[in-house]
Amino acid sequence: MTTNRDTATSAFDTDELVINMGPQHPSTHGVLRLVLRLDGERVIDMDVVIGYLHRGVEKLTEQRDYTQIVLLTDRMDYVAAASNNLGYVETVEKLMSLEVPKRAQYIRTVLAELQRIASHLVWLGTHAMDIGAVTVFLYCLRERELVLDLFEEYCGARLTYNAMRVGGLPMDLSTGWEAKVRAFCDLLPGKIDDYETLLTNNRIWLERTKDVGVISGADATAIGLTGPALRASGVRRDVRKDEPYAAYKDFDFEVPLGTRGDTYDRYTVRLIEMRQSVRIVQQALDGMPDGPVMGKVPRLIKPPAGETYHAIESPKGELGYFIVSDGQSLSPYRLRVRPPSLCNLQALPQLARGHLVADVVALIGTIDIVLGEVDR
């Protein structure tokens, strides 16, 4: 027999609620689906469901020659296409033991750091807008347009650049391009100051980011985090410093670190990285060597039989390419990408447990994922 007391208790009994966030939710930064297990509004656990944007890029590379594959790399992290290009062409050059002219290495470094700035601006604008700061989005996109203008003048494109070639670059810098880059570098630090004025000590921003999504350095390393998300947890790992590529060994710059590993630290680390990118670009322009921008490369690229792995520090973390050549074909026998967005996304359930549903939005933004790179 059920008493009135039992009926009253069961009426207020709370079970776990399972809901979908995405794959069409605007704050998931692409076609990402999160299956949330909730106790009220608090996240108990989460399943991350991917694959909605899969295009089989790695399989496609087996049907394209080594030059054509540059186009495919553009379409992974499509807000940092130049970084994808750089990682791929340097891997092929490593496999073939090609020497790249010094001027090409310097220009590649300039392009990579401009791309880092553009990527971080997209991240900051969308991350801030997710949390409610719409003005920052407008400001960041305004400065990003200036970077896209520079890329457009260099290679004729604003999103997918096809900006690099195995052995060097498709073209040299146009007259006046360096001066425009210097003007942008003079402008950007003041704009970053504006972003900080709006956010860094903003009470609402602090409440939404401080102590949200804390991950220790040991946990971040164990789960495979790289890039700003790892450095925000106090781990000094930057491929540009640890395993220099392009011309990074010639430049002096700092690797910013966080202390708590929360969403706020990941914000500050990326802001400092943009300032350091300006510093690198200015040094590269000051020391820009003369000479050709293309090395001696055979007309048909056919690497010797073997395999190699090469990684760069993309805006989102360690981007690596593993290529196997059979020595006979004009296409790779196998190409595998180590994408930072996919690897960093593994941390999302751990970051979200114990936080509110509203915090999940901030945590997706703080990882800085692009689904084109997650699914490939």
Image: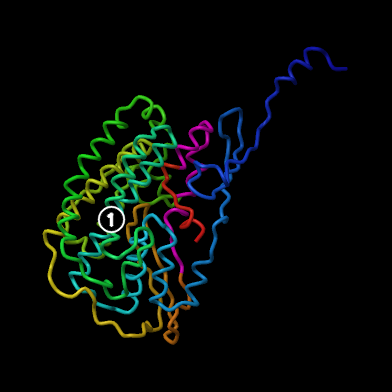
The residue beneath circle 1 is: 149
Q: State the count of labels.
A: 1
* Mark 1 secondary-structure assignment: helix
> Which residue sits at x=27%, y=55%?
114
- Residue type of the residue flagged with mark 1: Asp
Residue, far bottom: 328
Quarter of the image for the N terminus: give it.
top right
Horizontally, residue 168 falls left or right of residue 206, namely left
Horizontally, residue 37 falls left or right of residue 311, namely right
State which quadrant residue 241 falls in: bottom left
Q: Nearer the viewer, residue 93 or 26?
A: 26
Q: Magenta part mainly helix, strand or loop?
A: helix
Residue 137 image position (x, y, % from top left): 36, 39
Horizontally, residue 51 falls left or right of residue 269, namely right
Q: For label 1, count other residues whose C-alpha is less than 10 Å away and answer few (under 14), some (14-19) or many (20+).
A: some
> Which residue sits at x=55%, y=60%?
54
Q: Which residues are magenta?
A: 336-364
* Residue 347 part of the magenta-drawn span: yes
Residue 264 image position (x, y, % from top left): 35, 35
Residue 117 image position (x, y, % from top left): 29, 50
